[in-house]
Amino acid sequence: MAVVIRLKRMGKENAAFYRIVVADERRSAKGGMYIEELGHYNPVKNPAIVKLDNERAAYWVSKGAKVSPTMSSILKKNGVVMPVKARKVKKEKKEKKAKKAAK
């Protein structure tokens, strides 16, 4: 089961606010059940209001939960450490040519 941290839309048509939830990836983002509520986000207010349980968010990220792009930026702003993805190191073109020439 894939778990994702995302926003669940709530509120009226022109006055939306969001709950920050941990949910099964297969469930609906708007009306589906969720595993745990981590906080809320209200972009209508100026400045936007974000209430987030950073410890629980860090726990779920450490357990391998995927994070939606919007939630990724919110977590970074609140100081939650995101895991670093392993990157492939590209070899220099000269090294590749040298290996081909050696064969």
Image: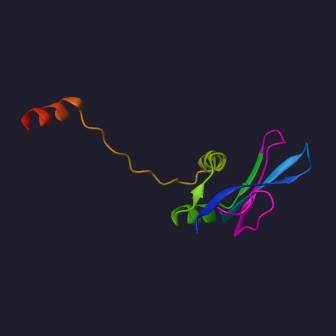
Q: Give the range drawn in magenta.
A: 25-48
Its colouring scheme is rainbow
Q: Where is residue 35 in the image (x, y as percent from the top left)?
A: 69, 70
Describe residue 91's horizontal placement relative to residue 33 as left or right: left
Q: Where is residue 42 in the image (x, y as percent from the top left)?
A: 81, 48
Describe residue 26's horizontal placement relative to residue 41 as left or right: left
Q: Magenta stretch containing residue 37, yes or no?
A: yes
Q: Magenta stretch containing residue 51, yes or no?
A: no
Identify whether 100 is placed above or below 43.
Answer: above
The mark total stands at: 0
Describe residue 83's horizontal placement relative to residue 10 as left or right: left
Residue at the image point whose x is 74% and y is 55% from the top? 51
Q: Say which of 39 and 29 sits in front.
A: 29
Q: Say which of 70 and 91 sits in front.
A: 91
Q: In which quarter of the image is the C terminus?
A: top left
Residue at the image point whose x is 7% and y is 36% from the top? 102
Describe residue 75's horizontal placement relative to residue 62 as left or right: right
Q: Where is residue 8 in the image (x, y as percent from the top left)?
A: 77, 56
Residue at the image point whose x is 84% and y is 42% from the top? 44
Residue at the image point whose x is 24% and y is 33% from the top? 92
Q: Say which of 66 and 73 sits in front.
A: 66
Q: Among all residues in the image, which is located at the extreme front?
A: 103
Q: Where is residue 90 in the image (x, y as percent from the top left)?
A: 30, 38
Q: Quadrant of the N terminus?
A: bottom right
Magenta residues: mostly which secondary structure?
A: loop
Identify whether 53 is placed above or below 101.
Answer: below
